[in-house]
């Protein structure tokens, strides 16, 4: 039992800025084994965002412009809680994919710490879309703020369990080595249960939409670089955020 708890605590330490006061012994193997619980960590993040939305809506208001301000504040809270590691992956991925370079060059571009023009444009469009979508969700059903972090983190679990690493070495390679089809299925079941508990039967539809997008994005990335990387997993996570929010706006 302690092994599972320790793995989850390591996941919190590595993937968020939430302080953990219990001592753990980190290893890439333990982090890899913890990825199947990532949707559960998404629930924690989602509950924080949902709680913040209640406070901000009461303080700022619920008129259209006010909701956009609240949406911006919620995004800032999210960044404070989880950091920008996944956003960095989003920018690096699109810098590489939009370069239309050979595979090896794309992988080099992803490793470059600098953000290129393509990455910068994608980040700007991402934040505009997210602010607008969250502002609409606030008027429809705030529970989607709990759901989208769950399903976004399912994307990492699925990519780790179903993907092949595009590089020969790297931290994400260790994560992928510790996951397979069994772990991916576990994460899908876990995420589905959590989403249904939050949103009811409609949550199954949202989950299916998210899963289909995750598989679609993974397939297209694989065509470009013959596998996945930590950056593409981060990009998938961030894009699933938007897909789930958009589905929420459409389905209500």
Image (spheres, rainbow, N blue to C red):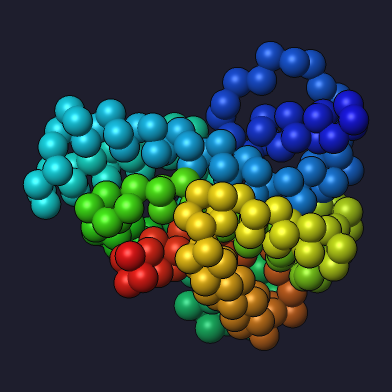
Looking at the figure, which quarter contains the C terminus?
bottom left
Q: Is residue 146 left or right of residue 160?
A: left
Depth check, front residue: 234 or 34:
34
Residue at 85% across, 35% down: 4
Work out whether 85 lies above or below 107: above
Residue 155 lies, in percent from the top left, at: 63, 62
Work out whether 141 lies above or below 247: above
Looking at the figure, which quarter contains the N terminus?
top right
Depth check, front residue: 169 or 148:
148
Residue at 9% across, 47% down: 63
Number of numbered tags placed on the structure image: 0
Residue 154 lies, in percent from the top left, at: 64, 58
Q: Is residue 133 left or right of residue 16?
A: left
Residue at 41% across, 38% down: 49
Q: Is residue 91 left or right of residue 160?
A: left
Residue 222 lies, in percent from the top left, at: 69, 79
Toward which corner of the image does residue 221 lie, by quadrant?
bottom right
Q: Is residue 250 visible?
A: yes
Toward which corner of the image does residue 195 lie, by quadrant?
bottom right
Residue 225 lies, in percent from the top left, at: 69, 78
Q: Is residue 46 left or right of residue 189?
A: left
């Amino acid at each position: 039992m302690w092994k599972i708890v320790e793995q989850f605590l390591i996941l919190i330490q590595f993937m968020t800025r939430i302080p953990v006061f219990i001592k753990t012994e980190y290893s890439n193997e333990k982090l890899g084994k913890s990825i199947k619980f990532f949707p559960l960590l998404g629930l924690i993040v989602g509950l924080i965002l949902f709680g913040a939305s209640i406070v901000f809506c009461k303080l700022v208001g619920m008129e259209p412009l006010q909701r956009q301000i609240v949406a911006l504040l919620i995004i800032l809270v999210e960044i404070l809680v989880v950091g920008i590691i996944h956003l960095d992956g989003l920018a690096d991925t699109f810098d590489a994919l939009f370069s239309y370079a050979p595979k090896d060059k794309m992988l080099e571009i992803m490793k470059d710490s600098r953000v290129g023009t393509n990455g910068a444009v994608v980040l700007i469009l991402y934040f505009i879309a997210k602010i607008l979508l969250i502002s609409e969700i606030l008027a429809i059903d705030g529970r989607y703020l709990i759901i989208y972090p769950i399903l976004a983190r399912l994307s990492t679990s699925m990519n780790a369990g179903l993907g092949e690493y595009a590089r020969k070495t790297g931290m994400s390679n260790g994560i992928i080595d510790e996951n397979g089809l069994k772990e991916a299925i576990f994460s899908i079941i876990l995420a589905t249960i959590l989403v249904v508990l939050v949103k009811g039967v409609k949550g199954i539809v949202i989950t299916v939409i998210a899963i289909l997008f995750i598989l679609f994005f993974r397939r297209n990335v694989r065509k470009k670089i013959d596998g996945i990387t930590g950056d593409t997993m981060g990009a998938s996570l961030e894009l699933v955020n938007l897909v789930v929010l958009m589905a929420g706006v459409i389905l209500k």
